[in-house]
């Protein structure tokens, strides 16, 4: 199955709570996924709203996920920043649990002046520690570090797949970030070949502009790129959720749904 949704609350939705956004996503847009955004801060969500969203999503077959704050660097030289980063991820995990959201997506950190292998080992240590906390708290969520768009950021697809195998986390596959990171020298087929055996793919998608250093900015998602990705997912018989993160995530998610319906 291929699910389609957007990051955040639709701009055309009159209500500005996540509860409003979820109902609008299903009733008006007829999409079946939504990523709740804590990217700019862990704002307070009332228990009533979280319970409503959990129940509504289950009853209406809408898949919920959470994106943790951008302000995360698990490989920082400064220990207080690492501690604060882990706290933000775990607070996002707690919110995800009460929302009934499964994946907790985040950008894990930067290489800085460290050797890439040393950064990888740091990620193993810090993510394992957080996984142990999640298990102890009995939160029904999984950590999903995201493929990043710059070579200076941890990490590309190969390292995240290695991490997933070693510590049993999940990953968020951002197709646009991978394209930027690899300067367009790959294809969706090649990416999906590496993902064989993963039961469900949580993915991000948008247009992307890049420089020699990687990602520069997200762009509107072009129909030809959407069709190419969807054809590849269908060919690989992938079970996937596509969260659009373009400057118009709601319009582009609807565009993706329309193209998927035509391919079916």
Image: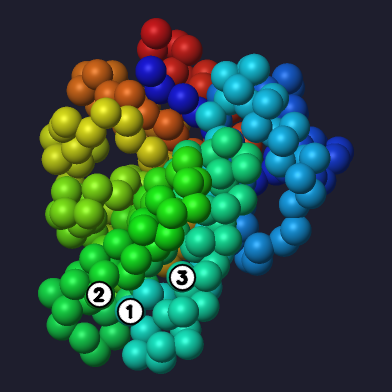
Task: State which quarter of the image contains the N terminus.
Answer: top left
- The answer to whether one can see residue 245 in this image is no
- How far is the residue under mark 3 from the one under mark 2? 13 Å
Residue drawn at x 36%, y 56% is 131
Q: Which one is in front, 137 or 23?
A: 137
Hey, which residue is sitting farthest top in the picture?
Answer: 264
- How far is the residue under mark 1 from the one under mark 2? 6 Å
What x and y, as percent, mark residue 156?
23, 59
Residue drawn at x 64%, y 17% is 59
Secondary-structure class at tag 2: helix
Q: Which residue is mark 3?
A: 86
What x and y, as percent, mark residue 196?
16, 32
Secondary-structure class at tag 3: helix
Hey, which residue is sitting farthest front in the picture?
Answer: 136
Callouts 1 and 3 close, C-beta under 8 Å: no
Type of colouring: rainbow
Residue 99: mark: none
Q: Which residue is mark 1?
A: 75
What x and y, as percent, mark residue 220?
52, 45
Residue 122: mark: 2
Using the image, determine if residue 205 lies above or below residue 59. below
Which mark sits nearer the N-terminus, 3 or 2?
3
Residue drawn at x 31%, y 46% is 170
Of tags 1 and 3, the one toward the viewer is: 3
Using the image, determine if residue 231 lies above or below residue 160. above
Secondary-structure class at tag 1: loop
- How far is the residue under mark 1 from the one under mark 3? 11 Å
């Amino acid at each position: 199955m291929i699910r389609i949704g957007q990051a955040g609350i639709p701009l055309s939705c009159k209500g500005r709570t996540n509860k409003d956004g979820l109902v609008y996503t299903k009733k008006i847009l007829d999409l079946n996924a939504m990523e709740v955004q804590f990217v700019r801060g862990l704002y307070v969500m009332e228990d009533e709203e979280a319970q409503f969203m959990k129940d509504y999503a289950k009853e209406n077959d809408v898949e919920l996920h959470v994106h943790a704050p951008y302000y995360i660097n698990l490989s920082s030289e400064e220990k207080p920043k690492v501690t604060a980063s882990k706290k933000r991820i775990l607070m996002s995990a707690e919110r995800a649990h009460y929302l009934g959201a499964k994946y907790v997506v985040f950008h894990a950190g930067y290489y800085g002046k460290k050797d890439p292998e040393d950064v990888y080992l740091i990620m193993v240590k810090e993510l394992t520690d957080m996984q142990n906390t999640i298990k102890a708290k009995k939160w029904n969520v999984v950590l999903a570090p995201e493929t990043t768009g710059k070579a200076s950021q941890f990490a590309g697809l190969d390292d995240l797949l290695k991490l997933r195998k070693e510590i049993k986390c999940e990953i968020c596959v951002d197709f646009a970030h991978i394209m930027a990171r690899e300067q367009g020298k790959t294809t969706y087929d090649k990416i999906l070949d590496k993902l064989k055996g993963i039961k469900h793919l949580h993915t991000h998608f948008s247009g992307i502009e890049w420089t020699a250093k990687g990602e520069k900015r997200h762009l509107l998602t072009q129909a030809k790129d959407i069709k190419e990705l969807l054809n590849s997912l269908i060919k690989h018989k992938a079970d996937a959720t596509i969260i659009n993160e373009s400057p118009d995530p709601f319009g582009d998610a609807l565009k993706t749904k329309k193209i998927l319906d035509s391919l079916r």
